[in-house]
């Protein structure tokens, strides 16, 4: 009596992995939890080098209620084990529904999920969005869990998008790639010629909190709200003093919403006008970027700004005032760099390759990712 059933053919799959061409769907939900970024990317291996072409992109907004459900998961005071367990499934189902409606053609999914807690000092990070639900719903293999192997090797598990920056964007020691998402992170070549990447501190996360609490807006569109205020130096000093420990910590270093959240600015919410508070927090965000660069990347003179913060004219103006040449690339790279970077990590996983230098403090390069099968 036959009791075993053949489910998956590893031989065929291994042949597929070494093909010259793959189409990978990169899926990213950032710390701002404002929506899902999706990039369908074709990769080709040409003369030993990987080249890419972006076929499709789309940002799909979450409803305000769903965004708040995710943000509740960031805090012990608003979340618990049952809440996280349910949200892990709910988020994956939601993502699967979003992706299914696109009707795009792709071979495999590179899925970041949603980071709800990042604890690098303990070697731990937690992303939700159950990959098995996604792979079954989409009928495609899903590569996920890109951070945990790095952390098992004593790395920070971030910023993993730096490998895309290093491979495709960095050209010289004077230029850095600055991603201003919920958290800001930077990728560059340090004065010794080594690849380096780390989080500088908050990006849009604190700005978004104030916009939502005081202005009823999801974010500071084009910097229009913050441009109406003036900088309160006493408030700026309080914020800076609360950040000294992180600033002094040498790279590799990472942070997240577990630190830079509503509670971080709670005591300041009623100490000045809403316009002045927002303007001061924008300045504070730029200040931490500048101080980290001046401490650890004094060779950097030009920054390529990507992520949602690239649209905030007030924030960019502050960076220019600190003496940097600011380059804002096309909207494709601003809006979808992280989703494209996830697709790139998926491509590396398929090929069994890793970037030769690590930026996270990991003991060695490693194959980032795990595999969930649809069968």
Image: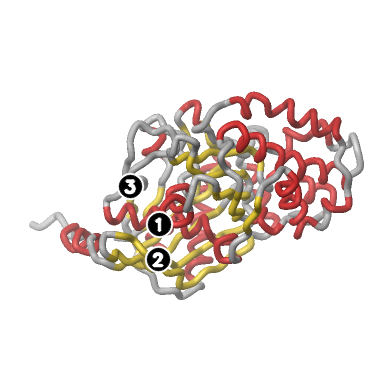
Sequence-first disc among 3 and 2: 2
| Residue 289 vertical placement versus 308 (above, below) | above
Tell me the distance, in whole angstroms, between the alpha carbons under discs 3 and 2.
16 Å
The first of marks 1 and 3 along the sequence is 1
What residue appears at the point 60 percent right and 50 percent down from the top-left corner? Answer: 303
Percent x, y for residue 294? 62, 35
The residue that label 2 is drawn on is 52
For residue 354, the mark is 3
* Near-viewer residue (353 or 59): 353
**First in sequence: mark 1 or mark 2?**
2
Check if mark 1's residue and mark 2's residue have beta carbons within 8 Å: yes
Secondary structure of the residue carrying tag 2 is strand
**At x 40% / y 73%, what residue is drawn?**
105
Q: Quadrant of the N terminus?
A: bottom left
Name the residue beneath numbered marker 1: 344
Classify mark 3: residues with Cα within 10 Å, few (<14), some (14-19) or many (20+).
some
> Around disc 2, counting alpha carbons within 10 Å, would you say few (fewer than 14), some (14 to 19), or many (20 or more)?
some
């Amino acid at each position: 009596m036959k009791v075993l059933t053949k489910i998956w053919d590893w031989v065929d799959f291994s042949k597929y992995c070494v093909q010259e061409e793959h189409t990978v769907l990169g899926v990213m939900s950032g710390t701002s939890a404002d929506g899902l970024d999706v990039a369908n990317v074709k990769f080709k291996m040409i003369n030993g080098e990987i080249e890419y072409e972006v076929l499709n992109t789309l940002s799909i907004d979450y409803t305000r209620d769903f965004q708040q459900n995710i943000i509740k998961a960031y805090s012990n005071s608003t979340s618990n084990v049952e809440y996280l367990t349910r949200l892990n499934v709910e988020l994956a189902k939601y993502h699967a529904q979003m992706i299914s409606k696109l009707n795009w053609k792709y071979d495999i999914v590179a899925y970041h999920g949603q980071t709800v807690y990042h604890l690098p000092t303990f070697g731990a990070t937690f992303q939700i969005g159950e990959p098995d639900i996604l792979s079954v719903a989409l009928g495609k293999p899903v590569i996920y869990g890109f951070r945990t192997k790095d952390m098992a090797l004593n790395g920070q598990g971030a910023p993993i998008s730096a490998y895309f920056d290093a491979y495709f964007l960095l050209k010289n020691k004077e230029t850095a790639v600055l991603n201003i998402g919920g958290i800001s992170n930077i990728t560059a070549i340090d004065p010794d010629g080594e690849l380096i990447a780390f989080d500088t501190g908050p990006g849009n996360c604190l700005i978004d909190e104030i916009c939502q609490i005081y202005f009823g807006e999801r974010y500071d569109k084009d910097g229009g709200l913050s441009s109406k205020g003036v900088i309160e130096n006493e408030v700026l000093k309080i914020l800076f003093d609360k950040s000294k420990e992180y600033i002094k910590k040498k790279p590799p270093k990472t942070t997240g919403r577990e630190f830079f959240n509503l509670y971080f600015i709670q005591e300041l919410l009623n100490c000045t006008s809403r316009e002045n508070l927002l303007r001061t927090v924008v300045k504070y965000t730029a200040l931490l970027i500048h101080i980290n660069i001046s401490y650890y990347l004094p060779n950097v003179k030009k920054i390529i700004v990507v992520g949602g913060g690239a649209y905030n004219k007030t924030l960019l103006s502050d960076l220019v005032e600190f003496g940097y040449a600011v380059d804002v690339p096309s909207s494709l790279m601003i809006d979808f760099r992280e989703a494209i970077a996830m697709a790139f990590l998926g491509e590396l996983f398929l090929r069994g390759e890793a970037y030769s230098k690590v930026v996270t403090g990991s003991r060695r390069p490693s194959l980032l990712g795990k595999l969930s099968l649809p069968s």
